[in-house]
Image (spheres, grey):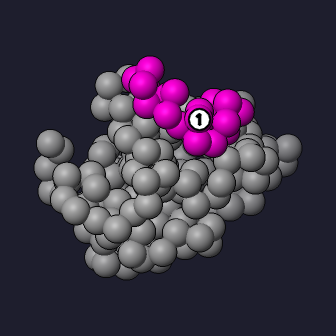
Amino acid sequence: MARVPYLTPDDLKPEDRDLLARPIALARALANAPGAARAFHGVGHWIRYDSGLDPRLRELAILQVGYLARSPYEWSHHVKIGFDFGVSEADVRALMAESEGRPNDLEPLARLVLRGAREIADEGGMRAETFSAIEAAIGRQNTVELVIVAAFYAAVVRVLASLAIDVEPEYQPYLDKFPLPSAAP
């Protein structure tokens, strides 16, 4: 159960009702702090619609962060969103295997991106050699954008956990099909 109320448009000032244009549980909880919600949504919007990073690689990086954090909300939402941006079911299963050190069929660039996202999520920053390898593969701008994406979602999973945001019923099938490990490593 969330630690703050899930607001509705009627709970908000007219100028803040746009914050619930996408009335997911996270947006409804963040609306308790409209200015923060607006800033939070701004970064998320840029990541999804304005970043130059390949959308499939972006979603794999986000999924990697969600998987490592054992974040049911992040994982379920971005499995669905990932499908909209070119992530396949095989990619999701391969990411799970890669995260657990098992063999998988991901291509080398996807593995490299996942390694960078794991380092950001687990170590607080990407290692120099990983950064250099990614920069050589996708360029400086896309590498910086990847760092921003993984770091932002490392923060998102902490917001979700701290506010105890519930997974909406329509996202539960993604958790059922691609379950998270039960305990953090």
When the figure is inspected, residue 23 is found, relative to residue 171, above or below; the finding is above
Q: Which residue is mark 1?
A: 136
Q: Position of residue 71 (x, y in %)?
A: 34, 51
Name the residue rendered at 44%, 20% in the picture: 128
Q: Is residue 94 left or right of residue 83?
A: left
Q: Is residue 66 visible in the rendered structure shown here? A: yes
- Residue that extends furthest to the front in the rendered view of this protein: 136
- Mark 1: give few (<14), some (14-19) or many (20+) Cα within 10 Å: few
Name the residue rendered at 59%, 33% in the picture: 135
Name the residue rendered at 27%, 52% in the picture: 99
Q: Position of residue 60 (x, y in %)?
A: 48, 56
Q: Is residue 93 left or right of residue 22?
A: left
Q: Position of residue 111 (x, y in %)?
A: 40, 51
When the figure is inspected, residue 136 is found, relative to residue 73, above or below; the finding is above
55 or 23, which lies in front? 55
Mark 1: amino acid: Ala
Q: How many marks?
A: 1
Q: Quadrant of the C terminus?
A: top left
Task: Give yes or no for residue 139 being in the magenta stretch.
Answer: yes
Secondary structure category for the residue under label 1: helix
Q: Is residue 168 visible in the rendered structure shown here? A: no
Name the residue rendered at 58%, 60% in the picture: 56
173 or 96, which lies in front? 96
Question: Which residue range is magenta in the image?
Answer: 126-144
Task: Give yes or no for residue 13 being in the magenta stretch.
Answer: no
Q: Position of residue 21 (x, y in %)?
A: 74, 59
Question: How would you classify the magenta stretch by its main secondary structure?
Answer: helix
Q: Is residue 120 left or right of residue 148?
A: left
Q: Is residue 130 left or right of residue 139?
A: left
